[in-house]
Every structure is written in C-alpha cells, then in structure tokens.
Amino acid sequence: MKNIGIVLFVIITAVLSIANKGGRASDKNTGSTGAPGEPQACKNCHNGNIVVNLKMYLLDGVDTVSQYEPGKKYTIDVQVLHTSGPVPKGYGFQITGHKAKLGNSGETILNLSPNTPNVKTATTSSNRFYAEHKGTSSTPLFKIDWEAPAKGTGPVSFYTAGNGVNNNNDDSGDGASKTSMQIDEKINTSVEGGLKNEILNVFPNPARTHVQISKDLVSVYSNYQLISSEGKVFYQGELKEILNLDQCNSGVIFLNLFNKANSSHQLIKLIKID
C-alpha cells in the first residue's frame, strides 16, 4: 500500500509539472509574469541551477522604440538568454499587458497575437489576456504582434517571464527570470496636429522664464501641457494667463492646448531661451 502511495505521488507530481508545458494561463488558469495581482512568478518554482536572463523589446520594423503611436502595429520580442549553468533543453515564456503605468493594475491588453509558431494566446477566468509558449520551445526567441491602442490611452506596461528547462518533467534544475517595460504614448508634434506659432495669443516668444496667454485662448481652452520636441511633459494642468517655463529645457517646446472635452485641439510652437 505504501508503494502504491509513492507511485501515485510520483505520477501526480509528473502530471502537474508536465501541465505547465502548454503555458500557465492555458493549463493552470493563471499568470506568472510578475504583473500586479498575480499570485507568483515563474522563478518561484523554476529556481534551479540553469541561470537565464530575459530581454524584451518593442520593435517598429527593425527599430527598437520606447513610445507607441496610437493604432500602429508593432512586434514585441522576448528573448530567454542562457547566462550560466547547464544549457537549457527547452524554453518557455508568458507575457501580459496593462493599460496603466508600470506597477499599476489596469485594463488588460487584448490585441496580442502570435508572430512565431511557438506562441499562443489564452484568457484566464479573471479576464486577463496572455501570450505564452505553445509547448516547450526549442528556440529562446518568442515574437508577438501588438496593435497600439487608441489616442489618449496613455502609458501601457508589459510584464513577461521566461524559463530555461532541462526537460526532466520536473521543476527541479530549471531556471527562470522576469522583466517589464512601460511604453508611453507618443505625442504628435507635427503640422498635422495643428502646429501654429500664435504671436498675438502667446507672448513673449522666444521667452526666458514665462509666457503670457491671451484671455481669448484661456476662454476657449481649459487645460494645457508644455512638452519637449521628443514628447517629454514638463508641465500640465489648468490653463492660466501666466505659464512658468523654469523647468523646460532651452530650445523648441510646444504648448498643447485642450478644450473642455479634454481632446487635443491646438499645438503652439514656443522657443525657450536661457
């Protein structure tokens, strides 16, 4: 009877270990990426002497980018890099995204899709959407297609975990790692976005420490942003007749004006001088 119990324990352990080969969201209805609200990360179980590191990139064609343009299609590359210890015989990964700043919970990103055959997608009972390995992968590279959300969504964050495994049908000896990245929405500073140099409504221009906004503009627009040509936000808030430029870098900056519906309506080019 004791031997039967041991055999059953070994069988159950093997089944549980093998189950994750299909992806943790698919097989266990949960995530292990380290995203807010998840119960654990892969490294909680896969913490053996295989040592791996994880890299994640957002690609626009072949170029790595750190901002997204609303509605544009991108590729996310996840690489599980072997750094030391036994060479892995296989690889796995999982990724999820939130419409929120890094470390904050938010609406789950749904429009992730496989780009390579070793990737599939799954939704858990908590309505979190994941892309993950489709069986143990022989290659450490996983590619996922992503279509950026609509204008005004703001920052999004991706969380991913990956492992290198020894294929012994057990967690022992395997290694895992995790990483994350925040992708900010790119602010359009082109002529298409309504670029204007309003000499009469915003003055002086060029300016050193502050600019004065005409009463006409203040009566039409309720909020503003002062942003760099790269999209960095220096100031934002309620539009007033005097705007401070102290924290802005010298050079070209933009005054982005919003109406009461909080939709971008006018962009004005300013010159900050020392």
Image (cartoon, rainbow, N blue to C red):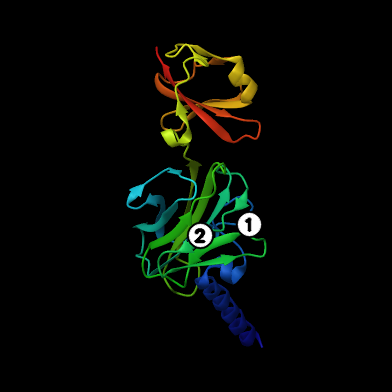
Rendering coords of residue 99 (x, y %): 58, 48
In the rendered view, tell whether residue 48 sits above or below residue 262: below
Q: Residue at x 59, y 84 (%)?
A: 7
Label 1 secondary element: loop
| Residue occupied by mark 1 | 39
* Badge number at residue 262: none
Mark 2 lies on a secondary structure that is strand
Query: Is residue 165 toward the left or the right of residue 217 in the image?
Result: left
Kindly check if marks 2 and 1 are in contact, taking CB atoms under 8 A apart as contact. Answer: no
- What is the C-alpha distance between the residues marked 2 and 1? 22 Å
Q: The disc labelled 2 sits on which kind of residue?
A: Leu
Q: Quadrant of residue 252?
A: top left
Tell me if residue 211 can be seen: yes
The residue at the point 41 percent across, 55 percent down is 75
Image quarter of the C terminus: top left
Image check: 189 left or right of 219? left
Judged left or right of residue 25, residue 78 is left
9 and 160: which one is in front? 160
**Are there few (<14), some (14-19), or many (20+) residues within 10 Å of tag 2?**
many
Mark toward the start of the polypeptide (2 vs 1)? 1
Q: What residue sits 41% from the left and 70% below the top?
A: 117
Give the answer, above or below, for where 127 lies relative to 27. above
Q: Residue at x 50, y 64 (%)?
A: 132
Amino acid of disc 1: Pro
Q: Residue furthest left?
A: 62
User: Does any portion of residue 176 appear in the rendered image?
Assistant: no
Of marks 2 and 1, the one in the foreground: 2
Q: On residue 112, which mark appears?
A: 2
